[in-house]
Image (tube, rainbow, N blue to C red):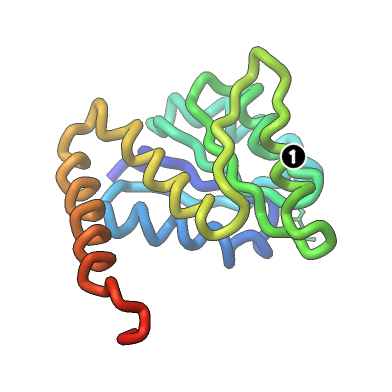
Amino acid sequence: MTALVGIIMGSTSDWETMRFASEKLEQLGIPFEVEVVSAHRTPDKLFAYAEAAENKGLEVIIAGAGGAAHLPGMTAAKTLLPVLGVPIQSKALNGMDSLLSIVQMPAGIPVGTLAIGKAGAVNAALLAAAIIANKHTQYKAPLNAFRQQQSESVLANSDPREL
Ligand code: RP5
C-alpha cells in the first residue's frame, strides 16, 4: 500500500518519541513510511526527500527534531504538502529549544507545530489522520472509534483511587 504519511526525524535518537506517531497511525490503519533525515547532517537527503514526497504519494509529512530543530521548517520550504512538526524533548533545554525553533517560522512557510515529546507525536499522527480522512473517508471510522474508546476509558476510570 502506498504510504500516505511520511514520518521523518533528525536522528535515530528521536525514535523513542516518534514511535508514538508511528504506533498511532498503525492503530488507525493509515499507511506510512519512516526515515531518518537530518537537516544538518544529511541536507542533500532532506532536499531530495521533500522534493520527491508529493510525487510518491505522500499527503502529509510529520517531522520530529530536537535542539536546533530545522528539519520541519526546511522540509516545509521544499514541499507544498502539510508539514507537522514535533519538538523532541532535548536533554539540555528540555525541548524548549526544539519547540521555539520549530514554531517560530517566518510568515510564508507554515509548519503545524505540536506539543513537546510524546503528546506531540501522538497528536501529529491524529492530526495527519484527520487531514487525510477528508479525502480518504474510510479513515473517519477508526478516528471516531479512537475518540469514543478514549472517552469510555476516561469515564470508566473516574475515581483515581481505584487505579
Ligand atoms: C537533532 O539533534 C535530532 O533531531 C536530535 O533530536 C538531536 C540530537 O541528535 P543525536 O546527537 O542524538 O543524533 O538533529
Element carrying mark 1: helix
Q: Position of residue 3 (x, y in %)?
A: 37, 42
Quarter of the image where the N terminus is located: top left
Determine the quadrant in which ligand 1 lies: bottom right
State whether residue 56 is above or below residue 153.
above
Residue drawn at (69%, 59%) of the image: 89
Q: Position of residue 137 (x, y in %)?
A: 18, 33
* Residue identified by numbered label 1: 100
Residue drawn at (26%, 27%) of the image: 134
State whether residue 42 is above or below residue 94.
above
- Could you tell whether 146 is left or right of 44 in the image? left
Closest to the observer, 96 or 105? 96
Residue drawn at (55%, 32%) of the image: 112
Q: Position of residue 128 (x, y in %)?
A: 40, 39
Closest to the observer, 1 or 142? 142
User: Does the beta carbon at disc 1 come under 8 Å from ligand 1?
Assistant: no
Q: Among all residues in the image, which is located at the extreme right?
A: 92
Q: Amino acid at mark 1?
A: Leu
- Could you tell whether 137 is left or right of 12 in the image? left
Q: Position of residue 22 (x, y in %)?
A: 43, 57
State whether residue 149 is above or below residue 125.
below
The quadrant holding residue 50 is: top right
Q: Residues within 10 Å of mark 1 (few under 14, many from 20)?
A: some
